Image (cartoon, rainbow, N blue to C red):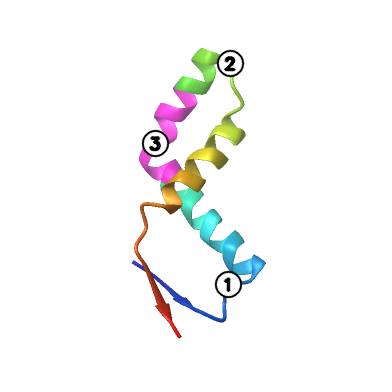
Amino acid sequence: MIYLNFTDLSEEAQERLIANSKEDVKKKYGKDLMDYATKHHTNLDQMLDEEALRNLYSYTYVFNI
């Protein structure tokens, strides 16, 4: 669960959420993504960014207003 203050939806907060999501994706699927990118000659960083955005939808958010 991710706790956010409703007034803290700034660009920095969004970047922090994406950075956390990237770390989660690296931990969960890092080896698989690297193998896929190598096999299909795709950009690993771009794949990581896309998967991190998808991963954000799996979080449960709690907003404090």
> Secondary structure of the magenta portion, mostly?
helix
The quarter of the image holding the C terminus is bottom left
Among numbered discs 1 and 2, the one appearing first in the sequence: 1
Q: Amino acid at mark 1?
A: Leu
The quarter of the image holding the N terminus is bottom left
The numbered dot on residue 29 is 3
- Residue lying at 42% horizontally and 47% vertically, measured from the top left: 55
Please say whether residue 63 is one of the residues in the magenta stretch. Answer: no
What separation in Å lies between label 3 and label 2 (alpha carbons)?
17 Å
Instruction: For the residues labelled 1 and 2, say whether their Cβ atoms are less than 8 Å apart.
Output: no
On the image, the x and y values in percent for residue 24 come to: 42, 49
Q: Which residue is mark 1?
A: 9
What separation in Å lies between label 1 and label 3 (alpha carbons)?
28 Å
Instruction: For the residues labelled 1 and 3, say whether their Cβ atoms are less than 8 Å apart.
Output: no
- Image-quadrant location for residue 59: bottom left
Judge the density around disc 2: few (<14), some (14-19), many (≥20) Cα neighbours within 10 Å: few
Foreground mark, 1 or 3, reads 1
On the image, the x and y values in percent for residue 27 come to: 40, 44
What is the secondary structure assignment of the residue under circle 3? helix
What separation in Å lies between label 1 and label 2 (alpha carbons)?
36 Å
Please say whether residue 27 is one of the residues in the magenta stretch. Answer: yes
Q: Which residue is mark 2?
A: 41
Position of 62 with respect to 19 (left or right) is left
Foreground mark, 1 or 2, reads 1
Task: Identify whether 54 is placed above or below 60.
Answer: above
